Image: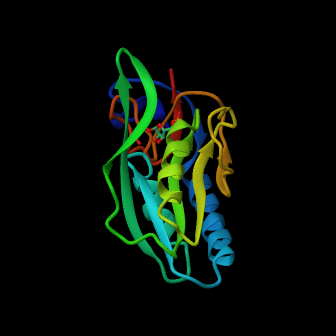
Amino acid sequence: MNTTADPRLLGRTVRQIVYRKEEIAKRVRELGAEITAAYPDGELLVLGLLKGSFIFLSDLVREIERPLQVDFLVASSYADGTESSGNVRLLYDPETELEGKDILLVEDIVDTGRTLSRLMDLLRARNPRSLEICALLHKHIATELRYPTRFIGFDAPNEFLVGYGLDHAENFRHLPYIASLQ
Ligand code: PRP
């Protein structure tokens, strides 16, 4: 596909398509099978962290062949004075009961790992039966992530990526591929 002529790009040029639509679909199918096998019993609650995970989450849950429930989290980093404090607060807190359930937290990308670390602390305090992370992309530069990422789609390059849920200034989330911009 000639991405330079892609009308979705607001006139920007793609430097490289890092993951094609078909490649993503194949990996999401594999992740779905891994997750299905990892949870033979129990109540599974898949929690999508908005907004970035919305496309990945919707594709992923359709590849998980066991009962499950879906809910969402909306988080926000907030500033402490002029510097970002690194604190994360929940703007939307899932109404679904977490206690005793297997929780799978779904994220589009792990960058510094700050968001996930704080959210995992918050969720762990609610006594789930288990708590794991599934990230489509992992840059492996996360110095602040104090939890392992159990399910990873792709080991991503340390570049600014857009598409398939990932944005730049709220644009490009709807690209069916994942790309780096020029
Ligand atoms: C992005 C991304 C991850 C987070 C990763 O979210 O979706 O949630 O940053 O960064 P970290 O590992 O350094 O914490 P963003 O805050 O841009 O919100 P969005 O999901 O609405 O795009």
* Viewer-closest of 67 and 17: 67
Q: How many marks?
A: 0
- Residue 63 screen position, x and y as percent: 54, 72
Q: Work out whether residue 39 or residue 96 is closer to the camera in this orientation and state it.
A: 96
Q: Identify the residue at image location x=66%, y=48%.
A: 154
Position of 79 relative to 109 (above/below): above
Colour scheme employed for the rendering of this structure: rainbow
What residue is shown at x 47% (from left), y 52% (from top)? 122
Residue 65 picture location, percent across and down: 56, 80
Q: Quadrant of residue 168?
A: top left
Above-or-below relation of 142 to 127: above
Q: Quick one: 161 or 104, which is closer to the camera?
A: 104
Q: Is residue 56 above or below residue 42?
A: above
The residue drawn where x is 50% and y is 43% is 118
Tell me: residue 102, above or below residue 118.
below
Left or right: residue 74 compared with residue 36:
left
Q: Quadrant of residue 34?
A: bottom right
- In this rendering, position of residue 24 left or right of residue 174: right
User: Which percent across, then down, holds residue 169?
Assistant: 34, 28
Residue 44, percent from left and from top: 52, 75
For the point 37% across and 44% down, which residue is it?
Answer: 75
